[in-house]
Amino acid sequence: MNNGYVHIYTGNGKGKTTAALGLSLRAVCAGKKVYFGQFIKGMEYSELKSQNILPNFEIHQFGRNCFIFNKPTKEDIRLAKDGLETCGRILSEGEYDVVVLDELNIAIFYNLFTAEEAIAVIKNRAPHVEVIVTGRYAEEKLIEFADLVTEMNEIKHYYRQGVQARKGIEN
């Protein structure tokens, strides 16, 4: 990988984080080093255990143990900005081959930082670093900036029938 590209996985369908985790697994199995930064998230997800199992895989959360449903708190904003700063340093240092910015689009949607701030951080990456951005509501500026954009569309989902998140599948 001489030239890293920017991917966006967006849309209202399930599978954005899952796709980023799948790409991360593929990269680790190919001998690459992966950093997975989760914005907004602070809850216990099964993938948090992956860094104890997979070599060259590191994951950190930049959120509280609840999701933002209304107006973000000062703590939500601080955690997101700290996360963007951390990810910016990691991207520029170039130690990792793949950097995932999970739910970055949602952080922008909730005005925790701007699309321009996120783009500046991504632009400042080491040239070989592949960047994966996930989350609903990707801003047009970020879509234009990206090299690859995939939109996940929900056609049918068992959540509509009352099925809650299941450990190892959605959580």
Image (cartoon, rainbow, N blue to C red):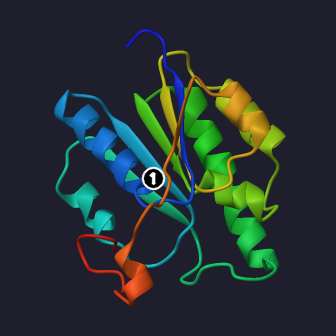
Viewer-nearest residue: 81 or 8: 8
Q: Is residue 28 left or right of residue 97?
A: left
Does 70 appear above or below 86? below
| Residue occupying the point 49% across, 19% down | 4
Q: Which sits in the foreground, 130 or 150?
A: 150
Q: Quadrant of residue 70?
A: bottom right
Measuring from the top left, give residue 109's x and y in whole percent: 76, 59
- Left-right relation of 55 to 38: left
In this rendering, position of residue 21 left or right of residue 149: left
* Residue 138 in the image: above or below residue 52: above
Q: In which quadrant is the C terminus drawn?
A: bottom left
Query: Is 142 on the left or on the right of 168, as rendered?
Result: right
Badge 1 amino acid: Lys
Q: Is residue 71 or residue 48 the one in the foreground?
A: 71
Residue 147 is situated, as x and y percent measured from the top left of the image, at: 58, 22
Residue that lies at the very extreme toward the front in this rendered image: 155
State how many labels appear.
Answer: 1
Residue 96 placement (x, y as % from top left)? 42, 32
Find the residue positioned furthest to the bottom.
Answer: 162
Number of other residues with Cα within 10 Å of mark 1, as a class: few under 14, some 14 to 19, many 20 or more: many
Residue indicated by mark 1: 16
Relative to residue 44, is residue 31 depicted above or below?
Answer: above
Q: Quadrant of residue 113?
A: bottom right
How far across and how far down the image is residue 132, in percent?
Answer: 50, 38
